[in-house]
Amino acid sequence: MAYLCLSTAWNKVEGIGVDVHIHRITNRLGWVNTKTPEATRIALQELLPRSVWQPFNPLLVGFGQSICRPVGPKCGDCLCNDICPSANIKKESGKAKSKKKQ
């Protein structure tokens, strides 16, 4: 998040500010295949031109908060659902019930 602070407060672009929203969205879209936000940042910086690093976080955070949510994403409302490999995938809810010992 230091990259986001540098960008917002001092207009210095040293990297892409990757939070949980950016990490989730870019993995769902298949742009990256990473386990952590830091790994996502590194992968995105290799993928994207430096000219889009600064606006990248502000453009996607609201989308991650309202449409591409962590739980209950609104794929039906998303304009990207026809190109998103994760659109409309349902995860099994709950854990398997354990059997009681007799």
Image (cartoon, rainbow, N blue to C red):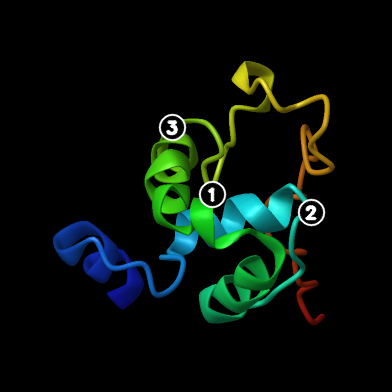
Q: Is residue 67 left or right of residue 55?
A: right
Q: Which of the two discs, 3 and 2, sits closer to the camera?
A: 2
Helix or strand or loop: what does disc 3 sit on? helix
Three-letter amino acid code at the position of disc 1:
Pro
Residue ID at (47%, 62%) = 20
Q: Residue at x 77, y 64 (%)?
A: 96
Position of residue 92 measured from the top left corner of the image (x, y, whole percent): 77, 50
| Label 3 crowd (10 A; few <14 / some 14-19 / many >=20) | few
Label 2, on which residue?
A: 30
Compute the Cα span from label 2 to label 1: 16 Å
Residue visible at 59% across and 36% down? 73
User: Residue 56, relative to residue 11: is it above or below?
Assistant: above
| Numbered label attached to residue 66 | 3
Q: Quadrant of the C terminus?
A: bottom right
| Vertical order, 98 against 27 (above or below) | below
User: Considering the image in quadrants, where does the N terminus appear?
Assistant: bottom left
Q: Alpha-carbon distance for marks 3 and 1?
A: 10 Å
Task: Give the class, few, some or many, for how many residues have Cα within 10 Å of label 2's Cα (few <14, many ≥20).
Answer: some
9 horizontally vs 21: left or right: left
Count of marks placed on residues: 3
x then y, percent, for residue 19: 43, 64
Q: What residue did someone put label 1 on?
A: 70
Amino acid type, residue under disc 2 in the picture: Gly
